[in-house]
């Protein structure tokens, strides 16, 4: 079939298998270009199919020759209907890993469930024995709680008062005002259940109880802080409460892993175009302005550059892992540089529909968004008849 991007709001309803494969290959080539990292050898990535999770799997495998298991929840293709991009990403990753003799298997299902946790643990026992590194990178808007059976939904709302600020429709470039009503306590509680640290802790506890954590095992979850301009709707809003819970959970997990000399970290990463961030009002405008500045300064990074730097310059240097006063790894350090943020703040005040194309990098935002779904890559023939029925070899 001829596969074209079909948009609905901040989601693309189609994905291109060849474009997704190109994206994966580009990331692999980048990691290989940076040289070998003396990193983990047996890695589990929970949320492995897109964004930071996919970048973590690629960095582990092609930067440290690691065997990897990836867990994700993606829709497979059917005749005349494409899979989700994460499915095609994972198929391409497994193909590339197999070419160079790297172990790579995947599990598709609800990572919040007891069944998928047990299925993963059984696979680890059968094939790898134990795991050295567990990456937790889930970004689901809903969670069916495995103990209560209650379906919880996260919301993106400020706390205490209505939030009003600028945002941009990245499809049209229209800069408008957006207002978001404040959260109820139920909104806050549900968001913490979905996006907080409880499920991360459940994964680690289940793995520990079944003996599949290696001595000295490390686990990392990803978070975001961001600037003052997004603070009310993000870090001080419902998502921020969930991130606070996630960060507190890291200390609890570290305590539980003391007998294994294990450690849990939260890595605070840079603002990037992801399916999740595209849905957050204000964030697309902020990213457009941030990209313009960071590209001009020569310090712009995508997911793969961020994670490769996390591995090579923070986690696996042979020295103690540097953290801030809250115990977090700060790989958002270039984004949060004072000079960068001062320039963003200045541009934010100026931003209008008419001047955003000049003062921001809306084109870069749109390009990255298309790339998420396998579109917009050079050397991919989007006019060609393409086989949508790409399967993942281990599933």
Image (tube, grey):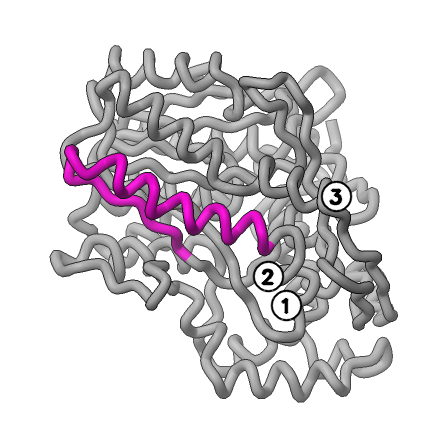
Q: How far apart are marks 1 and 2 (CA)?
A: 5 Å
Q: Residues within 10 Å of mark 3 (few under 14, many from 20)?
A: some
Which residue position is annotated with label 1?
231
Residue 338 in the image: above or below residue 307:
below
Residue 113 in the image: above or below residue 97:
above
Nearest the eye: 84 or 144: 144
Image spot of residue 22 (x, y percent): 51, 43
Image spot of residue 94 (x, y percent): 40, 28
Badge 3 or badge 1: first in the primary sequence: 3
Image spot of residue 272 (x, y percent): 56, 59
Q: Distance between the residues labelled 3 and 2?
A: 23 Å
Q: Residue at x 87, y 70 (%)?
A: 176
Nearest the eye: 143 or 91: 143
Which residue position is annotated with label 2?
235
In magenta, the rendered stretch is 240-267
Nearest the eye: 113 or 76: 113
Q: In this view, does 210 lie to the left or right of 200?
A: left
- Check if residue 108 falls in the magenta segment: no
- Check if residue 255 falls in the magenta segment: yes
Residue 370 in the image: above or below residue 104:
below
Q: Residue at x 46, y 35 (%)?
A: 48
């Amino acid at each position: 079939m001829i596969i074209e991007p079909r948009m609905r709001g901040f989601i693309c309803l189609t994905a291109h298998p060849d474009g997704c494969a190109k994206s994966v290959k580009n990331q692999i080539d980048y990691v290989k270009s940076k040289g070998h990292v003396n990193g983990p050898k047996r890695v589990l990535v929970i949320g492995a199919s897109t964004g930071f999770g996919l970048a973590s799997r690629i960095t582990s495998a092609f930067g440290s020759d690691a065997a990897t298991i990836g867990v994700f929840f993606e829709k497979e293709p059917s005749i005349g209907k494409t899979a989700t991009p994460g499915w095609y990403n994972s198929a391409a990753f497994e193909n590339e890993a197999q070419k160079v003799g790297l172990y790579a298997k995947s599990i598709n299902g609800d990572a919040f469930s007891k069944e998928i946790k047990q299925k993963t643990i059984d696979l680890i026992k059968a094939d790898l024995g134990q795991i050295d590194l567990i990456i937790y990178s889930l970004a689901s808007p809903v969670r069916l709680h495995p103990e209560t059976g209650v379906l919880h939904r996260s919301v993106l709302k400020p706390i205490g008062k209505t939030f009003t600020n600028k945002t941009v429709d990245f499809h049209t470039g229209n800069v408008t005002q957006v207002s978001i009503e404040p959260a109820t306590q139920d909104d806050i509680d549900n968001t913490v259940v979905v996006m907080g640290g409880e499920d991360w802790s459940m994964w680690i506890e289940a793995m520990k109880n079944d003996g599949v954590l290696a001595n000295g095992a490390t686990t990392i979850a990803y978070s975001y802080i961001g600037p003052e301009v997004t603070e009310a709707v993000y870090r001080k809003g419902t998502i921020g409460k969930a991130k606070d819970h996630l960060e507190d959970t890291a200390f609890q997990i570290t305590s539980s892993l003391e007998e294994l000399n294990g450690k849990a970290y939260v890595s605070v990463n840079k603002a990037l175009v992801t399916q999740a961030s595209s849905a957050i009002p204000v964030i697309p405008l902020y990213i457009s302005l941030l990209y313009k500045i960071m590209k001009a300064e020569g310090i712009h990074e995508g997911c793969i550059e961020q994670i490769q730097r996390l591995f090579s310059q923070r986690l696996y240097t042979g020295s103690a892992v540097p953290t801030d006063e809250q115990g977090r790894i700060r790989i958002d350090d270039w984004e949060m540089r004072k000079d960068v943020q001062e320039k963003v703040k200045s541009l934010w005040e100026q931003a209008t529909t008419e001047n955003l194309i000049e003062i921001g990098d809306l084109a870069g935002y749109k390009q990255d968004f298309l790339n998420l779904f396998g579109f917009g890559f050079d050397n991919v023939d989007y006019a060609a008849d393409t086989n949508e029925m790409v399967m993942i070899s281990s599933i």
